[in-house]
Amino acid sequence: NSKNPVDRWVTSGKPRQDYNIVLILEESLGSDFVGQLGDQRGLTPHFDALCSQGLLFDNVYATGNRTARALEAVLTSMPPIPTESILKRDHSDRVYTLAHVLAERGYERLFMTGGRGLFDGVRSFMQANGFNHFIEQSDIHDPLFANAWGVSDEDLFRKALGELDQLHQTGRPFFATILTVSNHRPYTYPQGRIPETEQTRQNAVKYADWALGYFFREAQKLPFYQNTIFVVMGDHGARVSGSQLFPMSSYRIPLLLIQPGEQKQNQRCSTLGCSLDLAPTIMGRLGGDYRSVFYGYDILKTNRKQGRAIMQHNHDVALLNSEDQMLVLGFGNSAHEFQLDRNSHQLLQQDQPDREMMHNVIALFQSTYELYYSDRWFPDFRQNPGSP
């Protein structure tokens, strides 16, 4: 496509399967809370148990440190533009998303949040960009518990179970994105679900994990369960303050894929990836061919040496490669290269950035900026980028 060089057909090489997709984005669930990823505090027993039923990606980084950045990344597979998420920008009513791709296959597309749709422009973005069902806090009546951020995760999941069952009854496949809110300051949650009552981040993680376990226990009883791919992913890690250019330990997030009856259980993938890779990885599981403008990779088909993570922090953007080299672009045309120490998660600055890597990273982010602001991101279906 002459208007958008990223526009292309992706061929999976296997038959198309229209599985339902349920994507659960867990608020502030960084890898440092997860037992299966090394934490020893016992905060996530339900998530850890679910890992035995699926495929855990243990080398994934969030693209940003805010929920809006996570939604942007997982749904559009678009590298981040510095300063502000596209959910809050003016040119965001024609952005090609995973929901659009699945609409072409006849899917129903549901977005659910336990909070208010007005926050960060979530409702307007989702309704303009592929989702034909939207549910927010005001649609969840008589919740058991709510705070300033929205209803509790169990209230959200209870509503979701009913909505997913109704979508199943239409006879069409569905794609549902569920955004939780409980693991957030002021860390309040319903009593009686976990032994702890103190309002702390750790206890909020434990409650959110309890609610996740509740959702899966109940979902297994419903007819859509066996034909569904479930994805559980941290939207970002816990936010930290400090002088580090990129707080790398807080950018590590869990990504778990569960496909009942269709995959080997208790598996791991250690290929480096990031939030941008979720949409292509899901499409790879579904098979068939599809029109794509995604920058991300199908992690399961990516050579480990080719894995990479694309990130944004404050005003800086960066790319981390499989050799732990990280190229950071900042204001004033600055470019710095670092070596990531995997043990300490510290970035060690190098004398000079690798010129080839620097030019490739600049091209990546510059192309995103130009396609977005020239309104060329959405595929022009009058042009065919080539047969699949």
Image (cartoon, rainbow, N blue to C red):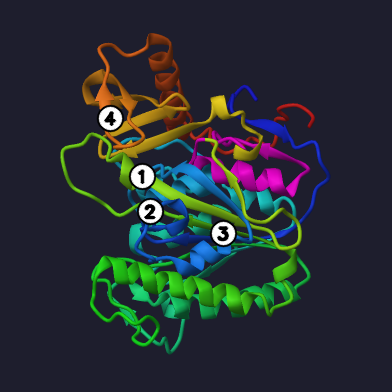
Tell me the element at label 2. Answer: loop
Towards the viewer: 275 or 199: 199
Label disc, if present, on residue 51 of the rendered structure: 3
In percent of width and height, residue 382 lies at: 70, 34
Horizontal side of residue 96 vs 228, given as left or right: left
Q: Which residue is mark 2?
A: 30
Which residue is drawn at the image coordinates 71% and 33% (left, top)? 9
- Mark 3, secondary structure of its residue: helix
Between the residue at mark 4 and the residue at mark 1, the CA separation in whole angstroms equals 13 Å
Q: Are marks 1 and 2 in contact (CB under 8 Å)?
A: yes
Q: Are marks 1 and 3 in contact (CB under 8 Å)?
A: no
Give how far apart the Cα atoms at labels 3 and 2 are. Answer: 16 Å
Q: Position of residue 289 (x, y in %)?
A: 76, 39
Magenta stretch: give its range: 272-298
Say how many tags the image has: 4
Q: Earlier in the sequence, mark 2 or mark 4?
A: 2
**Whether residue 217 is situated above or below residue 142 in the rendered picture:** above
Question: Residue 204: percent from the left, percent from the top?
Answer: 32, 70
Amino acid type shown at disc 1: Tyr
Q: Residues within 10 Å of mark 3 (few under 14, many from 20)?
A: many
Image x and y of residue 99, in percent: 61, 53
